[in-house]
Amino acid sequence: MNNNEKIKNRYNRVSKIYDIIESPMENMAMGKWREKLIERIEGKKVLEIGVGTGKNLSYYSDDLEVIGIDFSTNMLEKARERIKNKENIKLIEMDAQNMEFPDNTFDTVLTSCVFCSVPDPIKGLEEIRRVCTDNGKIIMLEHMRSENEVVGKFMDIVNFIPLNIWGANINRETIDNLKIAGFKEEYIEYQDVWSDIVKLIEIRNNKSNS
């Protein structure tokens, strides 16, 4: 079984209790930022990657055309319970590392607490860059490794625990990964939401001279 399948199976396994597992992070930082995340959307065609149990879905206005993807069947089942009659939202089982959308499809691509668990984060970010329009927008609310030496090393030591329970890495260096994936540093803006561990990242997808 490859790493993709292992992580997918872990998320399928914990889907029923995932919201409980994630509640400490939700209470500390994530919950109050979800609506603010949606407010930053530009354009009408939106892709949410790693839609999970659908915590963002209620915030989307009806005038947006939203596609949400996740590679976990069971997580998507939980998300579908949340959208009910919201006909402008379509949920699809799909791997963020190999998306089936044409280039330049979406005006805005959004993630929240996703790139801790994408098996190959560089490949996933390259795919985001591809499917987002030229000069489109990427909005990410992500937790990552602290820049504090002591805290960062502690996160490295205990990373195996969440990784083996449900497939999430707590020590990803997502800002650096964005640059490796081809996003230009001058178009990446971010702010600390909780300590320096949870960050709100906004990227202008400038593809010129790439």
Image (cartoon, grey):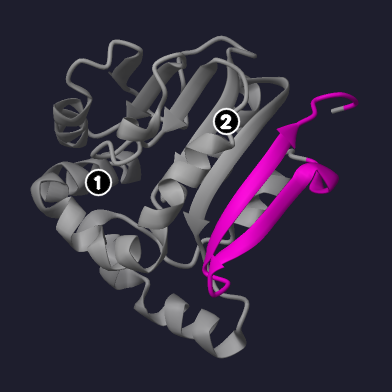
Asked if residue 195 lies in the magenta stretch, the reply is yes
Nearer to us: label 2 or label 1: 2
| Amino acid residing under circle 2 | Ile
- With respect to residue 149, does 185 lie above or below? above
Closer-to-camera residue (43/178): 43
Q: Callout 2: 10 Å neighbours few (<14), some, many (20+)?
A: many
The image quarter containing residue 175 is bottom right
The residue wearing badge 2 is 41
| Amino acid residing under circle 1 | Lys
Quarter containing the C terminus: top right
The residue range painted magenta reads 184-209
79 relative position to 146: left or right: left
Secondary structure of the residue carrying tag 2 is loop
Residue 128 on image: x %, y %: 58, 30
19 relative position to 125: left or right: left
The residue wearing badge 1 is 6
Residue 181 visible? The answer is no
Task: Work out how far the residue at label 2 is from the one at label 1, CA to CA, in angstroms.
Answer: 33 Å
